[in-house]
Image: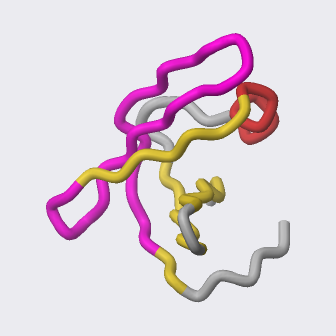
């Protein structure tokens, strides 16, 4: 997947709240903090994210995009 954002943070998936259309993924990042990403459930399933997975967060405008490593 290609992305153009320059701000990148690495973290681990802490929890997933899965809905019919949208899902929320909470991510622990290394600077003791937590970030969250809201994405479609279809995208969540396509990424195959599970709790404990390592991800890179790509931050662009108001969006936080999880990219599975």
Q: How many marks?
A: 0
**x and y percentages locating residue 34 in the rendered image:** 27, 51
Quadrant for residue 3, please give it: bottom right
Q: Quadrant of the N terminus?
A: bottom right
Side of 52 relative to 8 (left or right):
left
Side of 49 relative to 20 (left or right):
left
| Boundaries of the magenta span | 9-33
Side of 40 relative to 13 (left or right):
right
Q: Is residue 55 above or below residue 56?
A: above
Is 28 within the magenta?
Answer: yes
Quadrant for residue 51, please give it: top left
Quadrant for residue 52, please give it: top left
Q: How is the image coloured?
A: secondary structure
**x and y percentages locating residue 23 in the rendered image:** 59, 27
Is 22 within the magenta?
Answer: yes
Q: Residue furthest front?
A: 62
Side of 16 relative to 66 (left or right):
left
**x and y percentages locating residue 47 in the rendered image:** 73, 41
Residue at image position (61%, 36%) is: 49
Q: Residue furthest left?
A: 32
| Front-most of residues 60 and 14 | 60
Residue at image position (54%, 59%) is: 64
Residue at image position (61%, 58%) is: 65
Q: Is residue 13 above or below residue 62?
A: above
Q: Residue furthest bottom?
A: 6
Q: Is residue 29 above or below residue 58?
A: above
**x and y percentages locating residue 50 in the rendered image:** 54, 30
**Is the magenta region chiefly helix, strand or loop?**
strand
Residue at image position (51%, 32%) is: 24
Q: Quadrant of the C terminus?
A: bottom right
């Amino acid at each position: 997947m290609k992305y153009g954002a320059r701000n990148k943070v690495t973290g681990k998936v802490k929890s997933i709240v899965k809905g019919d259309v949208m899902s929320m993924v909470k991510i622990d990042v290394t600077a003791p903090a937590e970030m969250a990403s809201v994405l479609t459930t279809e995208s969540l399933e396509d990424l195959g994210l599970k709790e404990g997975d390592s991800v890179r967060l790509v931050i662009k405008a108001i969006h936080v995009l999880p990219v599975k490593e």
